[in-house]
Amino acid sequence: MGLGDFQVESGTVMYNFADDGWRGRLWLRTHCTTDNHGIFSCLTGDCGSEVQSCEGKPAKAPVTLDFLNFSGNDTQYTYDVSLMHGFNVPAMVYPQNSSCEPTGCPADINAICPSDLRVKDSAGKTIACNSACDAYRDPKLCYINEYGSRAKCQPSSQAKVFMQACPLAHTWTYDGRAFACWGSDFNITLCPKV
């Protein structure tokens, strides 16, 4: 079951229902347009489908990703907000069960993004922040190959910027930022006020 593609206006409250077996990713696409040939595209979070629906294709980095897994044991849900592939929009996930922890990134990382990782629009405004891995494809920054273990993996300077601004988000491979909650609904807040 997919949650679908939809436009969210400022101040909108939407209700979406997912079966207990649902798992997937949610992301925002921004600066979207349809050209005079009918091709839909977005400057951030685009999935390359050329139509409003992503047709099962994943978002292209940089993008803030919300991971939700409702297929756990006895309604145990796992969830996190990942900045592993960069950032485009602040987002928070709030479980409605008060004993469960919120996760996410309410800060505007675009404002503090290192200059070499900034993604800008045609007017020169920063609209997203790349991860060092996606920008440079360096195994040391991607935590793969010889750097693919906890013993040999350290957060990049970019990951440290993300960690400081958004300590509740998953910012690098071994930061342990994944959450579990039993029997809860979730509110996902985009661009939360901090």
Image (cartoon, helix red, strand yellow):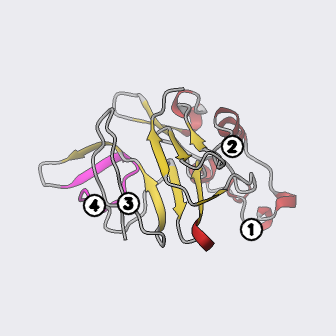
Query: In the image, which residues are magenta?
Result: 39-53
Q: Residue 14, how many percent across, how many down?
A: 33, 46
In the rendered structure, which disc, 1 or 4, sits on the residue that comes first in sequence?
Answer: 4
At 87% from the left and 60% from the top, the residue drawn is 151
Q: Badge 1 is on which residue?
A: 145
On residue 17, the disc is 3
Asked where in the image residue 168 lies, by quadrant, the reply is top right
Q: Are marks 4 and 2 in contact (CB under 8 Å)?
A: no
Q: Quarter of the image containing the N terminus? A: bottom left
Find the distance from the CA under tag 1 to the CA under tag 4.
Answer: 35 Å
Q: Residue 160, how many percent across, how many down?
A: 72, 39
At 54% from the left and 26% from the top, the residue drawn is 194
On residue 53, the disc is 4
Task: Choose mark 3 or mark 4, whichever is in front.
Answer: 3
Above or below: residue 13 compared with residue 6: above
Q: Mark 2 belongs to which amino acid? A: Ala
In the rendered structure, which disc, 1 or 3, sits on the residue that comes first in sequence?
Answer: 3
Q: Secondary structure at mark 3?
A: loop
In the rendered structure, which disc, 4 or 2, sits on the residue that comes first in sequence?
Answer: 4
Q: Are marks 1 and 2 in contact (CB under 8 Å)?
A: no
Q: Residue 127, how many percent across, how many down?
A: 43, 35
Find the distance from the CA under tag 1 to the CA under tag 2.
Answer: 19 Å
In the rendered structure, which disc, 1 or 2, sits on the residue that comes first in sequence?
Answer: 1
Q: Badge 2 is on which residue?
A: 159
Q: Secondary structure at mark 4?
A: loop
Residue 114 relative to residue 89: left or right = right
Q: Mark 4 belongs to which amino acid? A: Ser
Above or below: residue 38 compared with residue 76: above
Find the distance from the CA under tag 4 to the CA under tag 2.
Answer: 31 Å
